[in-house]
Amino acid sequence: MYDIVIKNGKIIDGTGSPSYFADVAVKDGRIVRIGKGIENGRETIDAGGLCVTPGFIDSHSHSDSNIVAYSAQLEKVEQGITSCIAGQCGGSVAPLPKNAVPADYTDWGGKEFEMRKTLAGFFDKTRDIPQGCNTAVLMGHGTLRRAVVGIENRAPTREEMEQMKAQLREAMAHGCPGMSFGLYYAPGCYASTEEAAELASVVAEKNGVIAAHIRDEEDDLAKAVSEFITIAKKANVRAVISHHKASGRAENWGKVTHTLRMIDEANAGGYDVYCDAYPYTASNTGLSSMFFPKAEHARGTDTIVRELDRREYRDMLKKYIIDRYGEGLSWVKTTANNPYPECYGMTIPEIAAARGTDEYDALFDVIRDSKKSCYACFFTMCEEDVCTVLAHPRAMICTDSGNAAALKQYHPRLRGTFPRVLGRYVREMGVTTLPEMIRKMTSMPARVYGLSGKGLIWENMDADICIFDENKIIDKADYDNCHARAEGLSYVLVGGHVVVRDAVSNGGRFGKVVTF
């Protein structure tokens, strides 16, 4: 007797090969048989007219930030994600910053201070907490640097470098798959190429993987891609360029054609370099990260918040912003932690109008009054570049998001990424074939990040499975109604258990914190 038999499905197995029709039998969390005429299931799912694929793998996630408080991970599974790679952009849930105190960490009912002292300890304390989807966590370089060096804009001492390497080795010994870099953000932006390569060499010792939010995605995109490829070459380690894009001024659009060619050249030279992307023309990050010179962040949040009361400081920042992006802020739409509840989801000019102020002063007020914690969507990319990156054979798919938790407003990629890729970019725009896109969503990230048993509809693989209507699947979340669920997603299985029907989670937690 099988636990579940999926009947009459169009199997897209994750390899990129053409589809075929068969039944799939599941028992004890595994795919145990694939063939015609399979019967004897405790539960039978009629997949006639539907595609049966491996569960989607989110190659760039931030869900480790609330892995205890919101372990159901509803927004992941309700778009077909059954595994995700978290701890990205140089930021991971552990280790805690230098001089951290328990009073600053209470979101998880007061438990997280002990849980987050080291990433190795975090794995030991969370591996038995059931998750809505499987989650692997990279060591964040910025988080590690903050724990050992602090926020200062300086190189680590030799002793500090050895401390960072020791913590990284310990984390990988406890199951961490590698390290992420946030070379755009403080304090990761203070690291030299040599510092990053030395730490990446520790990852290479365990055949791990590095990923990076590179140093620049705008004017100096090619230079930043070149730097990260150099890091990968120096360390001889597998590498992923995170959420690859060309953003900022329109003059930058089209640069991805050159940078993807750089990836191809590195791979032709015997290296192993990838990228991932999300299917939107707006990014999402902190307002202060986007609009402050990097050196300002080393001064600390409290200092910057006080400085924003000075007109001279605001005038300096305004000139910096206009010089970099031109006049006007209509391309900035606030999301999480807007300090003015009546202004949730508004653009900066709309907030300025509502509050009766200049739009730059509105921007600085939001940053000051949220204590630098406000996020926003930035409409700085073009659709043609999105298509170009999504079509590349080394590009994987990512949400670049955590979980909504109690957020009222967020980037719609948190809800709609994978259905949007399948509906808009495969079915409607034809950027690549459906079997090839499924490969990018499943077996490729499984291989890149070392997720054993994931990413294929083969016998003896884990029964993480999506079942959807290829003619109907589409995202419904947008920048105004970010909470809307996808359409056309019929079932999601994690570990052989049905956790989603018609894009609605039943709250099942059959995933885990994955260690290697």
Image (cartoon, grey):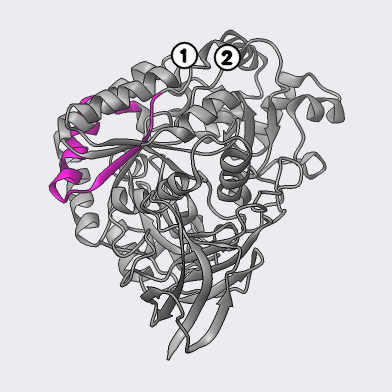
Query: For numbered disc 1, what is the local secondary structure?
Result: loop
Tell me which residue sits at (39%, 64%) in the image.
457
Horizontally, residue 476 falls left or right of residue 153, namely: right
For the residue labelled by badge 2, is the local secondary structure a helix, a strand or a loop? loop
Look at the image and tell me whether residue 154 can be seen: no
Q: Nearer the viewer, residue 181 or 61?
A: 61
Residue 463 locus on image (x, y percent): 41, 71
Specify whether residue 191 is painted magenta: yes
- Left or right: where 135 falls relative to 49: left
Q: Position of residue 271 (x, y in %)?
A: 20, 33
Lateral position of residue 264 relative to residue 11, left or right: left
Q: Label 1 belongs to which residue?
A: 219
| Inter-mark Cα distance, 2 to 1 | 8 Å
Q: In front here: 11 or 199?
A: 11
Does the segment drawn in magenta span residue 22?
no
Instruction: Give residue 469's quadrant in the image.
Output: bottom right
Q: Amino acid at mark 1?
A: Asp
The C terminus, quarter of image: bottom left
x and y percentages locating residue 447 in the rendered image: 29, 51
- Tag 1: Cα neighbours inside 10 Å, few (<14), some, or many (≥20)? some
Marks counted in the figure total 2
Which amino acid type is marked by label 2?
Answer: Arg
Instruction: Give coordinates of residue 429: x percent, y percent.
Output: 60, 35
Ranked by sequence position, the earlier of labels 2 and 1 is: 1
Numbered tag placed on residue 264 in the rendering:
none
Point out the stretch of residues depicted in magenta: 190-215
Q: Are marks 2 and 1 in contact (CB under 8 Å)?
A: yes
Q: Residue at x 57, y 55 (%)?
A: 403
Rendering quarter of residue 122 = bottom left
Viewport quadrant of the N terminus: bottom left
Instruction: Name the residue tied to disc 2.
Output: 249
- Label 2: few (<14), some (14–19) or many (≥20) C-alpha neighbours in 10 Å: some
